[in-house]
Amino acid sequence: MTSSYVSLEDQEEYKMMGTVVFSSEEEGYKFYLDYAKGKGFSVRKNNLKRKDGEIIWRQFVCSCEGYRELKHFERTERIREPRALTRCGCLAKLEIERNEEKGVWFVKEFDNQHTHELANPDHVAFLGVHRVMSDSKKAQAVELRMSGLRPFQVMEVMENNHDELDEVGFVMKDLYNFFTRYDMKNIKGHDAEDVLKYLTRKQEEDAEFFFKYTTDEEGRLRNVFWADAESRLDYAAFGGVVIFDSTYRVNKYNLPFIPFIGVNHHRSTTIFGCGILSNESVNSYCWLLETFLEAMRQVHPKSLITDGDLAMAKAISKVMPGAYHRLCTWHIEENMSRHLRKPKLDELRKLIYESMDEEEFERRWADFKENGGTGNGQWIALMYRLREKWAAAYTDGKYLLGMRSNQRSESLNSKLHTLLKRNMSLMCLVKHVKLCIQGLRKKEAQLDAKSTNSVPFCRIDADPLEKDAARIYTAVVFKKVRAQIRLIAGLEVISGTNQDGSSLYVVGLKDDNEVWDEVRVSFKGQALEGVECHCRKMECEDIPCSHIFVVVKFLGFDTIPRCCVVDRWTMGAKAAFRSDRNADPNVWSEHMVRYRSLRNLGSDAFFEAARNPEQTEKAMDFLKGILDKGSSSDENIVAGDFGPMPTHFSSSNQPLEKRVLDPEEIRAKGAPSKRRRPFRETLHTNNQ
């Protein structure tokens, strides 16, 4: 658009450029940026001159200045698609020079002649140099990602906070680039050693923090397990049933991440510990289970629920031979849909879930096989060999707290899914798992507060046993107990006999005399000392059944006898433990502590100021006076500038006994996935 004609507007611009002065080179650059944004083009820093090591002359040009070098066109081997052409020989520029006597910068030369069309006003914000993430937006982005939002969701929140999309100041690509640079700056040294030093520091701070690791012959990290003090206390209170899930793949080495999961007194998920293994061999699983028991003071769980890994099953039989091992029905269902079709699917489901004795199961299994349509004979044969781990005929009466699957693990997965990524380092994995566990503990603290400061509602005419249950159990468990108490309206004690110092009561339906179950009770003086029902609900779920409540009512009790109450479902489950569940798991720099305090207070103050125009204008003027006009850049990110201090800043200063190398990265075939396909489709497994 070169022309000999100079408009009045251009003449005014030239006059203005001849009068402006700047206190620094950076101020001159900011001036030209603002000018370019108003006109509709992008700029970049170009040539410079120095004197005695200091810059005394600087040239800023339009981003379309010059041309792409010929060598870039002549390349024959390319890894990536070349970037689009933007340079077209534009002549627009601004040159500034420093006046050494006055110490100020003035315009040496200015040219506003462009060889291309200027951008529309609604396109300017998307030009490269005008896309800038302010420091405050970087800090906000880091916190939003820490809360579990993915980058595209962070971007959506940022956009929703502004009236116009271009007011955000950056695009999705810029956000991804920032996160990449931020993560790289927050990972220091060797991944494996960073993890071990971090865990060592945790152990130095808390003697009850447990961790253990092994290395291979080359000194590479092989296996690691860790559990903090609260996880170990949780296991002491709630470790009767452990869910063991090895299907997570959330690290760049593609190693199995294995959380040990349980259910607390609110029937919510709790974490007993976490492990990372180098492979899924029997030896690796044996090491993990042995280390888990070492952390838990050799207290074995009564039952385990797993995804069906055969190597894991062998390890459980070796390390925990007394524990009942149940297979997850969710994983079984996944495989059923691949091997069977209706009506065989429905037939197998009945064998899984319907209560029956072992003889009836064997008879119905034979019918199931003889009628054909069972598909993969190998898988069906495997299922039969494992029947004691999944069929209700064998699992009824086992201590499982009413759980059949690792869906607690699946609910945990939904939480982990938002925080964990396939390519993250082990250090990031450990840090994000800590955040996830902290979230679960905050939920537990919230439920504890509700149960401590309130009592579930009961009708005025409710059974006294129900009112007593409301005072004893946590709110969620109370509903299950209440359901059993309300069933006694249709039951009655048919007969009672004394046998061997105890009493045996027969319970049946009212007006029917159909025997349901037998309840045996024992006394110590006038107090009920023990109770046992043939249905074994109390032994399996730690909750009294309706048959027990009928007998308790028959014996004249208006409160639930102590022998019928298991502490694990009450607020007394962890009464002796002083919790720090609401503590912030992160360490923040002084700068970020001040920022977070100002941000939280400012949010309320801004809302109040926005109630009338005068306050709004006053607040805006005050804030504009504070803002630093310097440009924000993350080229020199300092640890803790926009988020928590990196974990290596809170690691132990004590050197490891010997150097530990990072694990070898296992390249998975096909598309990567955070989780492997559930349950084994074939019998193949690595049994080394």
Image (tube, helix red, strand yellow):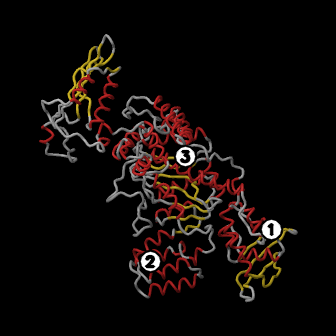
The residue at the point 61 percent across, 41 percent down is 206
In the rendered picture of this protein, how many numbered marks are placed on residues?
3
Q: Nearer the viewer, residue 211 or 62?
A: 62
Disc 2 versus disc 1: distance between alpha carbons?
Answer: 50 Å
Relative to 197, does residue 507 appear above or below in the rendering?
Answer: below
Q: Nearer the viewer, residue 406 or 627?
A: 627
**Residue under numbered circle 1:** 559
Mark nearer the N terminus (1 vs 3): 3
Q: Quadrant of residue 321?
A: bottom right
| Horizontal side of residue 147 vs 479, given as left or right | left
CA neighbours of label 3 inside 10 A, class few (<14), some (14 to 19), many (20+)? many
Disc 3 versus disc 2: distance between alpha carbons?
Answer: 40 Å
**Residue under numbered circle 3:** 211
Q: Check disc 3 and give the amino acid type.
A: Phe
Q: Are marks 3 and 2 in contact (CB under 8 Å)?
A: no
Q: Provide the secondary structure element on which disc 3 rests.
A: strand
Disc 1 versus disc 3: distance between alpha carbons?
Answer: 45 Å
Q: Is residue 369 visible?
A: yes
Q: Check disc 2 and give the amino acid type.
A: Ala
The residue at the point 28 percent across, 34 percent down is 36
Relative to 5, does residue 231 appear above or below in the rendering?
Answer: below
Q: Check disc 1 and give the amino acid type.
A: Thr
| Rendered-image quadrant of the N terminus | top left
Q: Position of residue 87 (x, y in %)?
A: 18, 38
Relative to 51, does residue 685 appear above or below in the rendering?
Answer: below
**Residue under numbered circle 2:** 381
